[in-house]
Amino acid sequence: MVKYEETEENANYGTRKSKSFFVLFILGFFIFFLGVMILVVAAVIYGGGSANFGAVIFIGPFPIVIGAGPEATWMVLFGIILAVLSVVMFVFMRRRLSGSSG
């Protein structure tokens, strides 16, 4: 039986791994944000002067839904539906995971 020893090398490996994960997470977030900005600018420039925009921002459990443009009502309605579905999925998955672990 191999005994795992907590050495400085093993502790540093975990720290390096978590730092690299964090860097990749931040990099992915900024690439996603840049892509969304490019799409918004392209829609405004090439969209014939009118663009629709809808967004859902979660701050904790509270969704903030915003929209702009001629079809903003439909975009906001779609955002609210997505927010409700995501909260329902979160609750369902949490119950499912907590029921299977006990």
Image (spheres, helix red, strand yellow):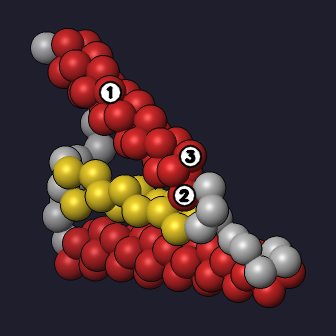
Classify residue 84 by image quadrant: top left
How far is the residue under mark 1 from the one under mark 2? 24 Å
**Which residue is rendered at x = 23% and y = 72% of the image?**
11
Asked if the residue at tag 3 contacts the one at tag 2, i.e. Cβ–Cβ closer than 8 Å, the answer is yes
The percent coordinates of residue 64 (x first, y second) are 30, 58
Q: Upstream in the sequence, badge 3 or badge 1?
A: 3
How far is the residue under mark 2 from the one under mark 3? 5 Å
Classify residue 71 by image quadrant: bottom right
Query: Mark 3 sits on what residue?
Result: 74
Query: Mark 1 sits on what residue?
Result: 88
Under mark 1, the amino acid is Val
Q: Residue furthest left?
A: 102
Q: Is residue 61 left or right of residue 72?
A: left
Up-down relation of residue 82 to residue 14 (above or below): above
Crowdedness of circle 3 by 10 Å Cα count: few (<14), some, many (20+)?
some
Q: Is residue 85 left or right of residue 10?
A: right
Quadrant for the N terminus in the image: top left
Q: Is residue 20 visible?
A: no
How far is the residue under mark 3 from the one under mark 1? 21 Å
Query: Mark 2 sits on what residue?
Result: 72
Crowdedness of circle 2 by 10 Å Cα count: few (<14), some, many (20+)?
some
The percent coordinates of residue 26 (x first, y second) are 44, 78
Q: Residue furthest front?
A: 70
Q: Is residue 14 left or right of residue 29?
A: left
**Label 2 secondary element:** helix
Up-down relation of residue 100 to residue 77 (above or below): above
The percent coordinates of residue 29 (x first, y second) are 50, 74
**Label 1 secondary element:** helix
Counting labels gives: 3
Quadrant for the C terminus in the image: top left
Under mark 2, the amino acid is Ala
Up-down relation of residue 3 to residue 71 (above or below): above
